[in-house]
Image (tube, grey):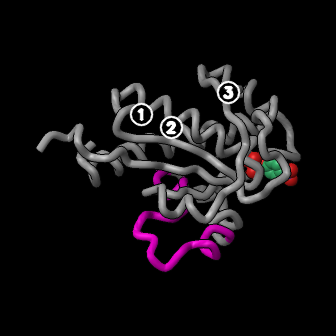
Amino acid sequence: MSHTTQPPVKVLFVCLGNICRSPTAHAVFEHCVAAQGLSERIQVDSCGTGDWHIGRAPDRRAIAAAATRGYQLQHLRARQVAPGDFDQFDYILAMDNSNLKDLQAMRPAGFTGHLGLFLAFGGDAEREVPDPYYGGDEGFDHVLDLIEAASGGLLAEIRGAHQR
Ligand code: 4NP
């Protein structure tokens, strides 16, 4: 059987507002997927646990920091996580422990995918992507460092687990 007949693996990045961390992860990971020619086989999305920024573009600081490294974020629009996301996604990856706790409370009994911290796939000691919203510009660079480091590990895991 050909690989191309398999449904795509679907990955969802989740933070609080869906305007800083998870759209950054969305764009960076999508870039990694495309660079390996896997855009047809791995689909990427992001959302927030909160509803404050629904319909908005990412934070201008997140857009600017990502652009300095060649990632485009400005087309993304915030949405809130929904129960149906657990039917759709194979990997639901939280940016911090608070996001993870909120997601665990929503998790249906029948969910067979992976729900966990995104940085579990990174090689660093840091386990959470810190919320940069109330800090300075350097916080957005640090977010990018952590996300770039974990994206390679996540892609290797998916390729191994799903023969992508
Ligand atoms: P994010 O950052 O969760 O990385 O998108 C935040 C954005 C907005 C707020 C908090 C965090 N807020 O409180 O509005």
Front-lying residue, 115 or 152: 115
The picture quadrant where one finds residue 104 is bottom right
Disc 3 crowd, CA 10 A, few/some/many (<14, 14-19, 20+)? few
Residue ID for mark 3:
75
> x%, y% of residue 110?
44, 76
Q: Mark 1 near ligand 1 (CB under 8 Å)?
A: no
Depth check, mark 3 against mark 2: the one in front is 3
Front-lying residue, 59 or 8: 8
Q: Which badge, 3 or 2, comes first in the chain's sequence? A: 2
Kind of residue at badge 1: Val
Vertical side of 3 occupied by 157: above or below: below
In the rendered view, does 45 fall on the left or right side of 98? left
Q: Secondary structure at mark 2?
A: helix
> x%, y% of residue 39?
39, 32
In the rendered view, does 160 fall on the left or right side of 69? left
Vertical side of 22 occupied by 85: above or below: below
Q: Mark 3 near ligand 1 (CB under 8 Å)?
A: no
Q: Secondary structure at mark 3?
A: loop
Q: Secondary structure at mark 1?
A: helix
> What separation in Å lies between label 3 and label 2 (alpha carbons)?
15 Å
Rendered image: mark on residue 145: none
Q: Bounds of the magenta span?
A: 102-123
Residue ID for mark 1:
33
Q: Residue at position x 80%, y 37% from top?
A: 56
Disc 2 crowd, CA 10 A, few/some/many (<14, 14-19, 20+)? many
> What separation in Å lies between label 1 and label 2 (alpha carbons)?
6 Å
Disc 1 crowd, CA 10 A, few/some/many (<14, 14-19, 20+)? many
Vertical side of 101 occupied by 93: above or below: above
Depth check, mark 1 against mark 3: the one in front is 3
Rendered image: mark on residue 29: 2
> Do the residues under discs 1 and 2 have CB atoms within 8 angstroms?
yes
> Do the residues under discs 3 and 2 have CB atoms within 8 angstroms?
no
